[in-house]
Amino acid sequence: MSPIDRLRREARLAPESGIVELINHARGREGLIPLWVGEGDLPTPSFIAEATTASLAAGETFYTWQRGIPELRAALARYYGRHFGGAHEAEEFIVSSSGMHAIQLALDAVAGHGDEVIYLSPAWPNFAAAAAIAGARPVPVVLDRTGNGWALDMEKLAAAVTPATKAVFVNTPSNPTGWTADRETLAAILSLARDRGLWVIADEIYALFSYGAARAPSFLDVMEPDDRVIFVNSFSKNWSMTGWRVGWLKIHPELQQVFENLVQYSSSGTPAFLQRGAVAALDHGDDFVAGQVERARKARALLCDRLAATGRVRVSPPAGAFYLFFGIDGVSDSRAAAFDIVERANVGLAPGTAFGAGGEDHFRLCFHRRLDQIEEAADRLGRWIEAA
């Protein structure tokens, strides 16, 4: 028996990311326009980096608060008050070592072996993989493709619930589709969760990347204080901090000690100097975020127009997030096509096969980059489509 055969089955069967597979294939390729991952092309703003530098210079390199430094938790409360309204307290927040860590903590709290967790597909693959590694069974509910984008069929969602179901994971605005739930849909999901005794894990990381309003609708708009909703989030997207690996959870205050324990037995806390940068992001970064959203709005319009002009691209402008999830007439194997697009067009797209059920014949393109790159990528893709 080989060493790998002695590992846990869940670990052995953890899938390779279909996004990372393509990145590893083309990494370092000269002249490639990389639109395959979910990040912009700007480095972290100096006002954030300087706060971390000052913290390092002050010697904040020791163990710190497991729940997060008080200053960051208070800054999160202020941030939510500004953008979501209402009163929020520091005791509602737990700092995590990335958004992915926040998701793992939420799963650790509500699901395990023999349980099921529902998620909406096509989806960012990490949630389903993390659930499976934890021993739970991830159950996809496929969004419906319509002429105006994507839509959730509540009857399909309700039908997926079984006695083993413990939670529903809802990412809105969605990565990769851009689907954005309205208040009525969020209220319907919450009503279902109440009726069936389920937790809702709410990933609202792209809430401010909304193209029809100042922010996307949130479960905060429709929930009661005691509803079983766990919010997971990250500093990565809004403030160009993908490499920092700092996130947070918003939870009922009664859950604080449980989640502090889960932090202790996973990461043992997020470095204090990184948290100082996160405080600066929250308190001084609203203008930066607004500028990023406007930049993405322009790139979205340019890209949708250019691709639609080919006559072969199935595309609807996403209501939120910063991805275009599109299909090309005559192309059914997005994985093979994504490799060919790298080789012949020198553009990196994420294949829809990486995002599970419902996405197999689509591609995800991150348009959160400067306009000249988006324009050049659209031209290259147009030429590839003509030749395909």
Image (cartoon, rainbow, N blue to C red):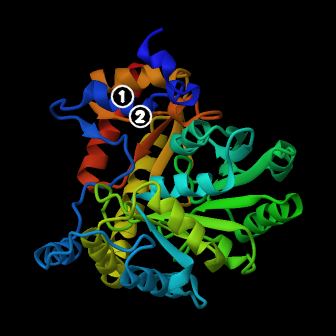
Residue 357 appears in the figure: yes
Judging by the rendered image, the residue that carries numbered circle 1 is: 22
> At x 78% / y 69%, what residue is drawn?
187
Helix, strand or loop for disc 1: helix
Q: Is residue 103 left or right of residue 117?
A: left
> At x 44% / y 55%, what residue is drawn?
322
Residue lying farthest to the bottom in this orientation:
87
* Badge number at residue 13: none
Judging by the rendered image, the residue that carries numbered circle 2 is: 19
User: Closer to the camera, 283 or 267?
Assistant: 267
Q: Is residue 27 left or right of residue 98?
A: left
- The quadrant of the picture occupied by the C terminus is top left
Using the image, determine if residue 73 lies above or below residue 27: below
Residue 313 appears in the figure: no
Using the image, determine if residue 164 lies above or below residue 268: above
Q: How many marks?
A: 2
Where residue 119 appears, as percent x and y from the top left, is 67, 47
CB-based contact (under 8 Å), mark 1 and mark 2: yes
Question: How many residues crowd around disc 2 within 10 Å: few (fewer than 14), some, or many (20 or more)?
Answer: many
Q: Quadrant location of residue 232?
A: bottom right
Residue lying farthest to the top in this orientation:
1
Where residue 115 appears, as percent x and y from the top left, is 74, 43
Using the image, determine if residue 325 lies above or below residue 250: above
The amino acid type of the residue labelled 1 equals Leu
Residue lying farthest to the left in this orientation:
57
Using the image, determine if residue 106 lies above or below residue 128: below
